[in-house]
Amino acid sequence: ADAAVSAAAAMVRVSLLDYGAGNVRSLKNALDRLGVEVEEVLRPEQIAAAQLLIFPGVGSFGNCMAVMQAKGFIEPLRAYVRADRPFLGICLGMQTLFEGSEESPGVEGLGLLPGVVGKFAFEEPLAVPQIGWNGISPQQESPMFTGLESGDAVYFVHSYRVAPTAALTPWTLCLSRYGETYVSGVSRGRVSAVQFHPEKSGAVGLRMLKGFLETALGMPPPPQSPSATGVFSSDYCKRIVACLDVRANDAGDLVVTKGDQYDVREKQGEVRNLGKPVELARRYYEEGADEITFLNITGFRECPLHDLPMLQVLSEASRHIFVPLAVGGGIRDMVDHRGVRSSALEVADAYFRAGADKVSIGTDAVEAARMFI
């Protein structure tokens, strides 16, 4: 039970290695949901002192390694993993365990696992990066797979993958397929890492995190399901995306609305109010939506960046919703009522740090990029 995780976690603090590149709010919220206290790693000595370390890497391989080198994280992290101490890498946090990556030629990884992370190599007409839900095929038993059933899927965002090799077989936790078969998880001893994002994979992902935490915290593992290993569907999946049009009504409150070509007013002249954004988003999530998209149809162009209402919506939604959150609308260069200018990149960055996993870029940004190129 989550209460058992909480009781054990009261004595052990999870150290989160956030090197400053991207949104880790979702992972913090997922750990909070499981009752775990989180400490952010800001200094190299915290890695050596950690009782349980989670590394949610995002961004590019080369930039990640450069930042970790500058912060003095690399050698303490190597020593921690080599000592077989409780560790979970997520996404780029898995890829950095290898010798290097084709994404950043000449940049050394941690070199703890054999091989180089490569580009997807297939001829199928599939988009890269892979962004979406995919199945996994477990290759060894793991508490992370307790309760996993055929058809369960997890959320991926990546352009590079780890190819299966004989040298990596002892470490291979699970495989997935996207145009080709690749390694989507590794595990040996108390060290595990996955290519997907359990914190954005709904109830399935939360169970995986719970299973890892229980084992890492020394709790007896639950009985393995007979289906915990074997061949599952490992192809990409169809998904249900709930899109909520959000705007301010005449009283200044944010509401979800719908209309014909943005004509969202009732005959009486009031903005059509279908409910509050976070409440409706939680309802869609609880009823099975695989992704929630907030479409800002107001813009809030004169609002200071740090006061953008959508930031509050994302922050609150990410505390309760553990599938990808996307936001669109209003992501452009802006000047607030005080004359303070914020670039589209700064606006997007604020959305990411508030809890967004994806941003939708509108026509203006596309045209500006085309002119620049």
Image (tube, rainbow, N blue to C red):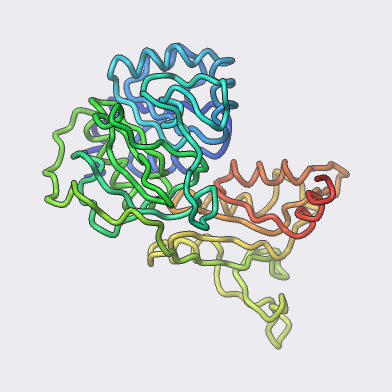
- Considering depth in this image, is 342 or 357 the residue closer to the camera? 357
Query: Looking at the picture, how far across and down is residue 181, in whole percent?
Result: 36, 46
User: In which quarter of the view is residue 296 placed?
Assistant: bottom right
* Foreground of the two, 166 or 316: 166
Residue extending furthest toward the right = 339
Picture coordinates of residue 144 (x, y %)? 26, 41
- Residue 59 placement (x, y as % from top left): 56, 35
Q: Is residue 60 shown above or below 106? A: below
Residue at (41% x, 30% y) in the render: 38
Residue 9 seen in render:
no
Q: Nearer the viewer, residue 290 or 228?
A: 228
Q: Is residue 164 left or right of residue 124?
A: left
Q: Quadrant of the N terminus?
A: top left
Camera sees residue 161: yes
* Position of 329 relative to 33 (above/below): below
| Left/right of residue 41 with respect to residue 166 in the rendered view | right
Which residue ends up furthest to the front in the rendered image?
123
Q: Residue at x 49, y 32 (%)?
A: 57
Instruction: Please tell me in which quadrant of the rendered image residue 182 appears.
Output: top left
Q: Which residue is drawn at the image coordinates 61% and 56% (left, top)? A: 327
User: Residue 137, relative to residue 15: is it above or below?
Assistant: below
- Of residue 182 and residue 147, the one placed in the foreground of this image is 182
Q: Residue at x 72, y 58 (%)?
A: 362
Query: Quarter holding the C terminus?
Result: top right
Left or right: where 245 falls relative to 132: right
Number of dots carrying numbers: 0
Q: Position of residue 155 (x, y in %)?
A: 42, 50
